[in-house]
Each structure stands twice: as structure tokens, then as C-alpha cells.
């Protein structure tokens, strides 16, 4: 049973690594277009003023720039996992390499949270309430999808 679990882990790791490689391979232009579309929808939903829009752009651009070396580190860690899988390393070695991504992912999440907290502080109370409502709807939508 243990070797079966190891095989399942190895296959799921390989599939995850493939998905990550595909996600990392998206073009910069596509990411930029997606980002701009999100910001436009987000701005319209919350009714951001032109000043708030500029502030949000500056906050999130600063976060992206600061996070760039951390994202590059994560890419290196993911490459190490892929290389281990492709070279036939044991499931335990692959898992250990995958665990190394955890602190880096945590650092990125912290950076995003700090940027979002800064942005949130720029919102009016009405916009903060609207944002909470949007988040609640999004969580409910995701929960409903996961039950399907």
C-alpha cells in the first residue's frame, strides 16, 4: 500500500508540476491583459475614484516589483522539483524539494497581504463593505463549485 501511495504522490506531483509549468509559461502580454481587465472590473465594482485607481496601481506595482526576486526563487524551487521528478528521484526526495517551496509561497502571500492591506486602507467604508460583499459572494461561488 505504501508503494501505491508513493506512486499516487509521484503522479500527482508530476501533474501539478506540469500545470505549474504551463501557468509559468503564460506570456507577459497575456498576464498584463488579464491584470488590466481585473483592475478595470475591480475598479468598476467598487466605484474607485481616479485617485484611488492610481493609488491601487502604484501599490500593486510596487508589490510586484518587490516580489520579483521571490517569484524567481520560487521558479528555481519548482524547477528543482521538476528535475527531481524527471531524474527519477525517490518520492521522499521529491516531497522534500516540494516542501522547500512552502516558505517562499508564504513570503509571497505575506507580500500580497501587505499590499492589499495598504490598498484596503485607501477605501471608503462603503467601498470596504462592497468589497466584503464581493469576497463573500466569491467564496460562496467557489464553495458551490467544489460541491458539484
Image (cartoon, rainbow, N blue to C red):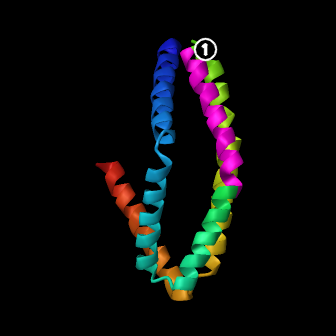
Residue nearer the viewer, 8 or 62: 62
Task: Name the spot of residue 3 as percent of width and height, x first.
Answer: 51, 12
Residue 122 in percent (x, y) is at 62, 81
Outermost front residue: 29
Residue 145 percent across, percent down from the top left: 32, 53
At 71% across and 43% down in the image, what residue appears?
Answer: 103
From the viewer's perspective, is residue 114 above or below residue 47?
Answer: above
Q: Quadrant of residue 41?
A: bottom left
Residue 20 rendering spot, x and y as whole percentages: 50, 37
In this picture, residue 57 sits left or right of residue 141? right
Most foreground residue, 121 or 145: 121
Region rendered in magenta = 66-86
Q: Which residue is mark 1?
A: 90
- Of residues 29 and 62, the one nearer the viewer is 29
Vertical comparison of 3 with 69: above or below: above
Pointer 1 local density, CA inside 10 Å: few below 14, some 14–19, many at least 20: few
Residue found at the far left of this picture: 148
Q: Quadrant of residue 71?
A: top right
Q: Relative to residue 11, is residue 61 depicted above or below?
A: below
What residue is rendered at 50% in x and 87% in y?
126
Residue at image coords 48%, 17%: 7
Is residue 133 located in the magenta-colored stretch of the structure? no
Q: Vertically, is 17 above or below 84?
A: below
Q: Tell me if residue 4 can be seen.
A: yes
Q: In percent of the image, x 61 and y 65: which residue is there?
A: 60
> Could you tell me which secondary element the residue under label 1 belongs to?
loop
Amino acid at each position: 500500500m505504501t508503494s501505491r501511495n508513493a506512486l499516487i504522490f509521484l503522479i500527482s506531483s508530476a501533474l501539478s508540476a506540469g500545470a505549474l509549468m504551463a501557468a509559468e509559461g503564460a506570456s507577459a502580454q497575456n498576464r498584463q491583459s488579464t491584470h488590466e481587465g481585473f483592475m478595470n472590473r475591480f475598479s468598476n465594482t467598487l466605484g474607485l475614484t481616479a485617485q484611488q485607481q492610481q493609488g491601487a496601481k502604484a501599490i500593486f506595482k510596487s508589490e510586484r516589483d518587490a516580489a520579483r526576486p521571490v517569484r524567481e526563487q520560487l521558479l528555481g524551487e519548482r524547477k528543482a522539483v521538476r528535475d527531481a521528478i524527471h531524474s527519477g528521484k525517490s518520492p521522499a526526495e521529491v516531497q522534500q524539494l516540494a516542501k522547500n517551496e512552502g516558505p517562499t509561497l508564504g513570503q509571497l502571500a505575506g507580500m500580497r497581504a501587505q499590499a492589499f492591506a495598504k490598498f484596503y486602507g485607501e477605501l471608503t467604508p462603503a467601498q470596504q463593505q462592497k468589497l466584503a460583499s464581493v469576497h463573500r459572494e466569491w467564496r460562496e461561488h467557489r464553495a458551490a463549485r467544489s460541491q458539484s
